[in-house]
Amino acid sequence: MLPQPMVKHVVLVTYGEPTGPGIREHLTYSWRLMQGVARSTADIAPPVLPLIALRRAHERSSLWRKHRYQSPLEPVTLAQAAQIRNALARQSSDTWRIHVGYEFREPQLLTVIKHLPRREQVIIVPMYAAASGFTHDLSKQSARYIDFRRPAPIIVAPPLAVERLASISADHVLQSTPPGADKNKTALVLAARGSLLKPAKDVETGRAMLERLGQAIARRLSSSFGMVATGWLNYGRGDKWTAPPIRATLRKVREAGFRDVVYFPYGFLADSSESQLFGRLAVASQPELKVVYVPCLNGSFELAEVLAAEIIAAH
């Protein structure tokens, strides 16, 4: 009897934001987020954490209800898993199993891994554009927590190389831009998640990598648009956050005389409330602009092909 082929497991991981506006779902998510991320960037007294989580949950739940927003993240992530499964089948004769896990809601990453056979290899793929203390490092912490209990290794795949991701993103923008647009009269706005410039704790924010990625996309598309500008989706006030904030970028575009805008949230691999809702709210501050929203890479064939190659190389 021939030996059974060794199965390799791939776990795609995202934050796993709430699917809808329900306050209970938002509160659970916010509580886990505060424990996992906020405490890694600031010294927050434990008694204060529940109050911060409750306020955040109430604000997000109310905002989603007001705009009748439902998150697309879960179906997008499942579609990405299907694309990567197909890409691995094309590129490798090994036996692969694809799973989806989340950092801050069920099924959580640790739960997914604990249910996998202990003697079979696991490759975690954080579905984020840049490595940081809030993205890949969270997955590495989970891997370290459970790795000593398993004879088979747990590998956390690194983020995609900046130039490779920039090339995929630039092609995606061009393919998603309506044909016939006058490039000389159209501005491209690139948006990414903002971060504190000097967190209270020494943690990698991913800002430098996102800056390089934005510059690489802009370099590839500078001849395709009359103007290319980058802005940050910040969630704090004052000058301690990445600049320019996205609203200032949009204002700059309008003041430069542009009315037609292509908006692309380049700092995200999958659409979420940050890429969709918060971007649209920022655009609403400049009602004179006529905006075409380019979705995130989501179920991109090219993204899946590159990720599959990275997974094969990682194992």
Image (cartoon, rainbow, N blue to C red):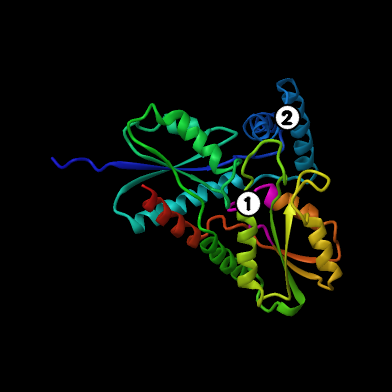
Q: Considering depth in this image, is 93 or 214 the residue closer to the camera?
A: 214
Q: Which residue is pictured at 36% across the width and 37% down the height?
A: 153
Q: Which residue is pictured at 65% across the width and 68% down the height?
A: 218
> Measured from the top left, where is residue 10 in percent x and y?
42, 44
Q: Considering depth in this image, is 105 or 42 the residue closer to the camera?
A: 42
Q: Where, by quadrant of the figure, is residue 204 drawn? A: top right
Instruction: Give amino acid for label 1.
Output: Asp
Q: Using the image, determine if residue 26 lies above or below residue 215.
A: above
Magenta span: predominant SS is: loop
Q: Secondary structure at mark 1?
A: loop
Q: Considering depth in this image, is 46 or 33 the residue closer to the camera?
A: 46
> Measured from the top left, where is residue 146 in percent x and y?
44, 29
The reply to whether residue 4 is in sight is yes
Q: CA distance from mark 1 to mark 2?
A: 23 Å
Residue 273: in magenta span? yes
Q: Residue furthest top?
A: 47
Question: Magenta part of the protein: which range?
Answer: 264-275
Q: Which residue is pictured at 68% across the width and 79% down the height?
A: 180
